[in-house]
Amino acid sequence: MAIYTIPPTRTRSIQDGINQMADVFESYADQIIDNMVTNALSNVGLPTLKVSKASIIKLINYIVVPQMQSWEAGWVDNPSTPSNPSMQGISLRTFVENFNFVFTYSGIQPVTQAANEWNATYPAWGLEPEFSKVVLSLVCGRPKIASLFIYYVFCNSGARNPIAVMTEDPWLGFFLGQSVWSSGANVYSTYVCDYDSVALDYGWNGLDSAWMSFITSLGDLTTNFALDCFLKRYNYIMKVSKPEGSNANYRTAWLDRLANSEKSDLLMIINITENFCLNSKNIYTFTSSETLHLQQKAANYKQMQLILPD
């Protein structure tokens, strides 16, 4: 039985190839995730982690992945997609690019071999114009596959290392990663919503090499910085979706995803604060130092007041 619905531009052989590649992907998912996160944190070079790698992986698996998947419900032009008409989704070209990145990044031989075989079988599959318009669902009953795309974004150094930021402030790291997801990782570094100007106002010197030392030096101010980043994104959405502009039809969907929906990023502040930082469902096993740090973060967020301008 096919995992993905075959659009008119797909052939049976390529669809089978996608499913076979996904099978390999899924069987090594846990090992790939561990390797990716280990490599990402090592590249940042943090001497100590306020929140452990194991805890961050659980946070992403239990809270972030379900939230992300709730917005990705099928082909990009499917009218039933929750984020319609914002055209959120992942193109077939991006699908294979991410596959190859994750496979290579994992360093796992069977996985890398599978990717090489795939590219040899379908060498030009991502270059044909109609393929770039086709979007694969990230739900499809395979959450581990969806999670690997999410880890790819969160471990992306060009996105200001969201996974490393999460070890200092889980919600701030989530928001930076989610912003990449919504913007597209390839354009995020040049987006006006990349929050560099906010960071400069808080004392960052503008150097990539100083990013994590800047984050860790903020202390309790990471919550203020996080909400200022949130406001920046809100203001940007309002600016580019004015009623007379070409993006006017997207405003409602963009704001739903940011703040006006039960699955919005704003509600994620509550989910991460309550379910992770305060461990309200007793899912996580924190050390005493992690517990103290996360409880302080939760307390800081609970004291914040967010007022969205008209």
Image (tube, grey):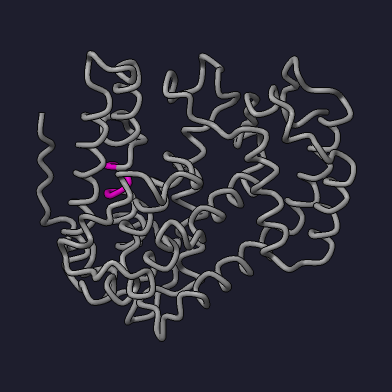
**Which quarter of the figure has residue 112?**
bottom right
In the image: residue 110, left or right of residue 180: right
Instruction: Give the quarter of the image for residue 273.
Output: bottom left
The answer to which image quadrant residue 246 occupies is: top left
Residue 110 in percent (x, y) is at 84, 62
| Residue 7 placement, left or right of 264 | right
Q: Which quadrant, please, contains the C terminus?
A: top left
Instruction: Give the residues in magenta.
Output: 266-270
Please say if 282 is above or below 130: below
| The N terminus, quarter of image | top right
Vertical arrangement, residue 21 with respect to residue 219, above or below: above
At horizontal 33% and vertical 70% (from top left) the residue drawn is: 207
Q: Nearer the viewer, residue 63 or 241?
A: 241
Q: Main secondary structure of the magenta part?
A: helix
Q: Is residue 52 above or below residue 160?
A: below
State the image coordinates of residue 158 (x, y, percent, origin top left). 46, 58
